[in-house]
Amino acid sequence: MKLKENDKLKKIYRFFLGLGISFSVSVIAITIATGLNGGESIQAVMIYECLGLSSCSALAGAVFSSEKLDFKWQLLLTYISVLGVLILFANIFKWYDLEGNWTVYSFFSLLIGLYTVCFLVTAGILAMVRKREDSKLNRKLKEYQDKYAVRKEKV
């Protein structure tokens, strides 16, 4: 029973961690895209849109963070689903129009590009953290095996 509770807590932790990271990334990406597109500041309503986008992104990240999936598959599935959510939000909130307004199209292109760069940086950081945790776990396992082997030899 305790193991299942730890899994639930881990998923909740991953959701809120993903929410914080994706909210920060989305606000930064929209701010940079707005600045590069000639705007002076983002609209206040876009903060709420970023929160909705971040919630969907964090949910997708939590869903695909299963221990049964390889880390590369987790990243790929999360990237594709969040990219889909980003495109959906862009259509719902009219982040670009289909009339051919290049300035607005470039805003959307910048947003996709910035999202991809931020996703790759975050994935790289997560990969380094996982690698460090794995090596720490392997080191502890090796210590335990050595300790157990010494005890067995004494008996």
Image (cartoon, helix red, strand yellow):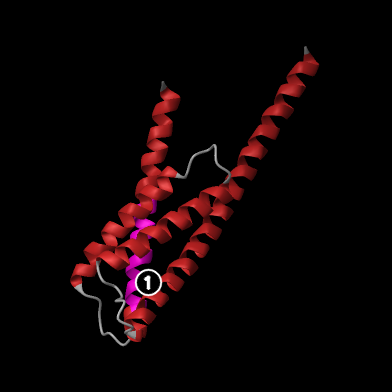
Helix, strand or loop for disc 1: helix
Which quarter of the rendered picture does the N terminus lie within? top left
Local crowd size for mark 1, using a 10 Å CA cut-off: few (<14), some (14–19), many (≥20): many
The C terminus appears in which quarter of the rendering? Answer: top right
Q: Main SS type for the magenta part?
A: helix
30 magenta-colored: yes
Count of number-bearing discs: 1
Q: Nearer the viewer, residue 39 or 142?
A: 39
Which of 125 and 69 lies nearest the eye of the viewer? 69
Q: Which percent across, then down, holds residue 154?
A: 78, 15
Taking the view exactly as shown, the residue that stands out farthest to the left is: 44
Q: Quadrant of residue 63?
A: top left
Q: Quadrant of residue 42?
A: bottom left
Q: Is residue 89 above or below residue 95?
A: above
Which residue is pictured at 38% across the width and 43% down the height? 13
User: x, y percentage for residue 119?
Assistant: 47, 62
Residue corresponding to mark 1: 29
- For image coordinates 22% across by 62% down, the residue present is 48
> Residue 22, percent across and down?
37, 59
Residue 50, above or below 71 = below
User: Which residue range is magenta in the image?
Assistant: 17-33
Q: Residue furthest front?
A: 99
Q: Amino acid at mark 1?
A: Ala
The question of residue 126 being in magenta is answered with no
Q: Going 43% across and 54% down the picture, which residue do you hit?
A: 81
Q: Residue at x 42, y 27 (%)?
A: 4
Picture coordinates of residue 6 (x, y %)?
42, 31
